[in-house]
Amino acid sequence: MCCLNIDFLNAIILGSSELNIFLDDPGFADTILKAEQAIEFGVFPERIRQGSSGSYFVKDPKRKIIGVFKPKSEEPYGQLNPKWTKYVHKVCCPCCFGRGCLVPNQGYLSEAAASLVDEKLHLGVVPKTRVVWLVSKTFNYNTIDRAKAKGKKYALQKVPKVGRKFHRIGLPPKIGSFQLFVEGYKNAEFWLRKFEADPLPENIRKQFQSQFERLVVLDYIIRNTDRGNDNWLIKYEKQKHGKEIKEAKWIDDKEPLIKIAAIDNGLAFPFKHPDEWRTYPFHWAWLPQAKVPFSEETRNLILPYISDMNFVQDLCEDLRKLFKTDKRFNRTTFESQMSVMRGQILNLTQALRDRKSPVQLVQMPCVIVEHSPGKTQGRKANLGSSFTQTFHCRKPFFSSW
């Protein structure tokens, strides 16, 4: 018998609007409502050509882009992935397809979980991302679903009494990640090349370094396996000559003049450290900013959180609630993912205390922190004695360090 969770069953019976309830975040709920209204008015999500999965620009009724939706069923491992190159890759070369350290078809949860970690640590680099349900004829559906939807619609038009017997008219909603769209940002590669030719003023350079360190903290904790210079963004507008800020002073409490947005977080939260073919390195480790020791600002922001084991356990519990929304949630696998994350947090804590740089951080030995057998597990348990620390020694065949 197939195990389906309640949300999945509800999705079959209800439309997407009945499932998208965000009482704790009225602003996000309003954005999703606008997206649903736009689809009702015929302003459909538009598929993004780049990437290896089906992802869509979602618009409001005025046709303004307000978010990026990535359906679970259209991920590289999903049955309805619309990118034929990935399909050929998966069929013809399955042994080399995917990343052996990641849970297949869990990218949408990884996107939302990265946003959760960002929010808990007050990093402010990940555009808000939540799990939502949406339905649109521009999504990739199989022939059977489209035929059923067409048949139900025809029955409702021709024989209203019969049509009303159907639980839902139209295509089934899809579950996936919805990330708020950020405006004014450009590919990091574009700006990094600009900065080489035209160095930033000292005050802007400090702001950029601070933002960069937050990106490092996020990626390291979630063990992002796909952070190149093409999947994080930078927003920077040079001030006009008359209003140009002098190099004198950088005021922390003002809005930064340069900001980073960490997008494409779907290939993170591995259940083990990479130990097969590739290391999946953090490409930002080769940037000059990675050679600078972590600033006092970053240390003061992050250390109070990650050095508190109760905070770390709370974070794991919040992630558990999120990951359990997937119908294939596996408790053992999830605990392995958290063991890797706790090990990353342990290394980061030590690196910040020792005033290391990001490049020194990524060169630290990989650690796994597991729950000790038979110990009490709870938010307020004696966390110092309920975990076991081990080093991960196996190296991938191709190593970058």
Image (spheres, grey):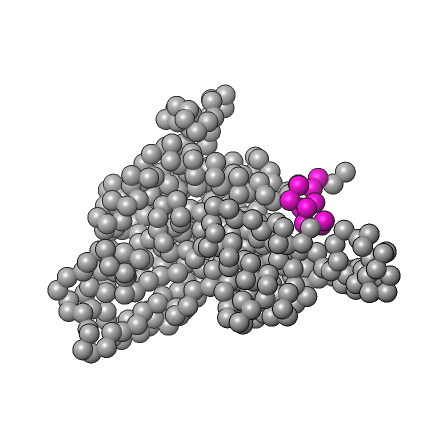
Q: Judge left or right: residue 354 versus residue 140.
A: left
The overriding secondary structure of the stretch rendered in magenta is helix
Q: Residue 356's spot in the image, x, y percent?
A: 25, 47
Residue that appears at 43% across and 29% down: 379
Observer-nearest of 58 and 294: 58
Q: Which residue is outermost to the front?
A: 161
49 to 164, vertically: above or below: below
Q: Which residue is outermost to the bottom?
A: 241
Q: Judge left or right: residue 288 versus residue 22.
A: left
Reply yes or no: does residue 4 show up in magenta.
yes
Reply yes or no: does residue 26 show up in magenta.
no
Asked which quadrant contains residue 311, the reply is top left
* Total tally of numbered discs in the picture: 0
Q: Which stretch did the figure color magenta?
A: 3-13
- In this rendering, does residue 96 appear at all? no
Q: Judge left or right: residue 167 versus residue 188.
A: right
